[in-house]
Amino acid sequence: MKQRCYNPNCNSYGDYGGRGILMDESWKESFINFYNDMGNKPGKDYDLDRINNDEGYYKDNCRWVDHKTNMNNTRKQKNCKRVVINNREYSVRELSQLTGIKATTMLYRIKEGLEGEDVIKTPTDRWGNVLFEPQSISGGIT
């Protein structure tokens, strides 16, 4: 974390320090300060995740999450476009996993100007005939 935020020779620097992503000063000074704020890693399959990827590493912007959640919260992923449905934000990748609709299909719909629920609605032709039925989201989107 420190290398990618402060070392211009680090391969990841451009995506972190080069964009102004920095660490909490107390974390930078001491691992103990980081540990006191974040605690133990809950398990081997957990990653440190920044909630807002445009902000730095500090207590209120970091959390421990499973790898899948972390991958759904990355700015670099092409499929990380965000769709808001019922006041909840989803990544295209996450919606694809929930609905069975291909991420590329949703990205095309977004590119064509569709937003929100229209991105995942059952597609129809110009006469209103259903083209196919996407899988429903288990438990529905709430």
Image (spheres, rainbow, N blue to C red):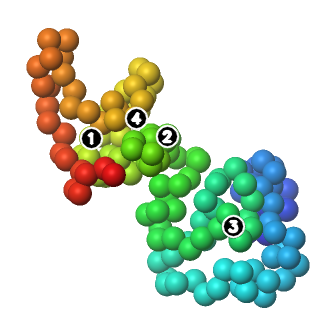
Label 2 residue SS: loop
Task: Sort mark 3 into few (<14), some (14-19) or many (20+) by Cα contacts within 10 Å.
Answer: few
Instruction: Give the amino acid at mark 1.
Output: Ile
Disc sitting over residue 81 in the figure:
2
The residue wearing badge 3 is: 60
State the separation of the CA atoms marked 4 and 3.
Answer: 28 Å
Instruction: Give the amino acid at mark 3.
Output: Asp
Instruction: Give the amino acid at mark 4.
Output: Gly
Residue at point 84% right, 83% down?
30
The residue wearing badge 1 is: 101
- Location of residue 17 by image quarter: bottom right
- In this rendering, the label closer to the viewer, 1 or 3: 3
Mark found first going from the N terminus, 3 or 2: 3
Label 1 residue SS: loop
Label 3 residue SS: helix
Q: State whether residue 134 is above or below residue 49.
A: above
The residue wearing badge 4 is: 116
Left or right, 136 with reference to 104: left
- In this rendering, the label closer to the viewer, 4 or 2: 4
